[in-house]
């Protein structure tokens, strides 16, 4: 049985998917989809008497913020945020139209179905539900619908934190992507779904940084090699980095995850068995496996223009993903790896964000899940990617990734992100609406 809350959530998610708000990352190819989506949300809020502010730092790139007053003036405000942009689609790879929001076999298909118009539509429905029913949440709630998350939040969260921090006055914690979906906790899930489900909450996010390796040497004619040329030096440095494995770091989020899954699956996760044990978790390993260590990945090579000319300089771009507190250790490890072969020039650098894995908010998440899934267990994990939470962290806000979706044991929500045929079970959206309503009311 579904009520108005769930029905509206589904309707809003579908309407938002139908507003094409693709963020290509290239300014002149981005339309006004984010602003149109923000206006859509503003109108739905206005219908129930909720004021909001549309902020459009540059045409078409709109974000929307609204605040609901809570009953406890001493409680810190809770920010609930969802980005309105989506990543591009390769249309031919889709079975159903990516902006059609069609429902087939119980699944809603469309770009943004899990990333993350599902949550945008859900929190909009929850805000309207409170207004309709006269429900006053305990904490002040700040709802933010944001542009540009998929290209670093330059026109969205980053811009708002720089220019409009007043919108987030009094906010202590935030709730958003990526987490909240269920994964099998017990080995035997049974056909009747007898096994328990873990609902993963991201308490930590890896940092993301970039650096350029620059190698130099003597330029010359290709017929007279100069020995150690820029290209050879660069190749040596890139190979050293590419073949290096950084050590495993047992973060608080990882320990929380290992504790729950170790107990449920009878796995020890010792220093030597860790990766082997994780591999037995199936697709869950693809999420957690990437959260064990820092990674540095060479992605772009530049050097030379012509086959018979030895260039004076060659360079490579590095994609760096960092665990909490690892910035300096990684910097020195990197310098050691490349030695004299190249200089390391740092680019943009966002450190990892870490929120307490034992915060009172986690008990609220657990209670809200338990009300709908009595054997569901909320389990912390470390998100091996990065979200708008990194921007809000600059305001001292602790961010958590939790968009509650109860799904079948073999449905990998994480694999839907940025994929063709992105989809979400309609029943999971209803679940999301009910659980999120409880969380935001009592948080
Ligand atoms: Zn996202």
Image (spheres, rainbow, N blue to C red):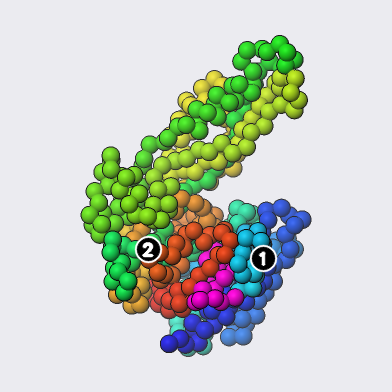
Is 59 on the left or on the right of 136, as rendered? right
Q: Which mark is residue 21?
A: 1
Look at 72% across and 16% down and name the residue there.
222
Q: How many marks?
A: 2
Determine the CA span between mark 1 and mark 2: 29 Å
Look at 50% across and 70% down and name the residue there.
424
Sequence order check, earlier mark of 1 and 2: 1
Choose between 295 and 126: the one closer to the eye: 295
Look at 33% across and 77% down and name the residue there.
371
Choose between 187 and 74: the one closer to the eye: 187
Q: Can you give x and y, in whole percent of width and height, for residue 30 in the image?
A: 72, 59
The magenta stretch spans residue 105: yes
Q: Residues within 10 Å of mark 1 (few under 14, many from 20)?
A: many
Look at 54% across and 76% down and name the residue there.
104
* Location of the N terminus (image quadrant): bottom left
Q: Which residues are magenta?
A: 102-120
Label 1 SS = loop
Is 60 on the left or on the right of 256, as rendered? right
Label 2 SS = strand
Kindly identify which residue carries mark 2: 183
Disc 1 + disc 2, Cβ < 8 Å: no
The magenta stretch spans residue 216: no
Choose between 408 and 170: the one closer to the eye: 408
């Amino acid at each position: 049985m579904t009520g108005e809350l769930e029905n509206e959530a589904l309707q809003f998610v579908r309407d938002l998917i139908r507003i094409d708000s693709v963020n290509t990352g290239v300014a002149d190819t981005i339309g006004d989809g984010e602003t149109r989506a923000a206006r859509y949300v503003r109108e739905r809020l206005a219908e129930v008497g909720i004021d909001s502010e549309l902020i459009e730092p540059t045409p078409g790139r709109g974000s929307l913020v609204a605040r609901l007053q809570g009953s406890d003036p001493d409680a810190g405000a809770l920010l609930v945020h969802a980005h309105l942009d989506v990543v591009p689609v390769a249309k031919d790879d889709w079975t159903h139209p990516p902006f059609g929001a069609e429902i087939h076999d119980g699944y809603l298909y469309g770009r943004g179905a899990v990333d993350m118009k599902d949550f945008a539509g859900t929190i909009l429905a929850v805000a309207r539900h409170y207004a309709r029913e006269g429900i006053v949440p305990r904490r002040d709630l700040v709802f933010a619908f944001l542009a540009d998350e998929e290209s670093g939040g330059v026109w969205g969260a980053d811009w708002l934190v720089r220019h409009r921090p007043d919108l987030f006055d009094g906010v202590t914690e935030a709730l958003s992507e990526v987490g909240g979906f269920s994964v099998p906790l017990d080995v035997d899930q049974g056909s009747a779904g007898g096994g328990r489900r873990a609902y993963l909450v991201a308490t930590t996010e890896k940092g993301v940084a970039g650096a350029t390796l620059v190698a130099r040497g003597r330029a010359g004619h290709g017929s007279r090699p100069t020995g150690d040329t820029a290209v050879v030096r660069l190749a040596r440095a890139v190979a050293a980095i590419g073949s290096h494995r950084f050590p495993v770091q047992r973060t608080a989020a990882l320990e929380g995850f290992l504790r729950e899954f170790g107990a449920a699956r009878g796995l020890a996760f010792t220093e030597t068995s860790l990766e082997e044990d994780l591999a037995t978790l199936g697709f869950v390993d693809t999420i957690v496996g990437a959260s064990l260590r820092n990674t540095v990945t060479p992605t772009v090579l530049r050097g030379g223009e012509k086959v018979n000319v030895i260039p004076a300089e060659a360079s490579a771009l590095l994609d760096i993903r960092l665990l909490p507190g690892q910035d300096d250790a990684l910097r020195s490890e990197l310098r050691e790896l490349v030695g004299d072969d190249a200089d390391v020039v740092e680019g943009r650098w966002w450190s990892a964000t870490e929120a307490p894995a034992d915060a009172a908010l986690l008990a609220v998440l657990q209670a809200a899940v338990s009300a709908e899934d009595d054997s569901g267990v909320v389990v912390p994990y470390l998100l091996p990617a990065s979200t708008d939470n990194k921007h809000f962290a600059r305001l001292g806000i602790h961010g958590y990734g939790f968009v509650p979706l109860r799904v079948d044991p073999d449905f990998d929500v994480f694999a839907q992100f940025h994929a063709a045929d992105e989809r979400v079970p309609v029943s999971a959206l209803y679940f999301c609406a009910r659980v999120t309503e409880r969380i935001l009311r009592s948080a």
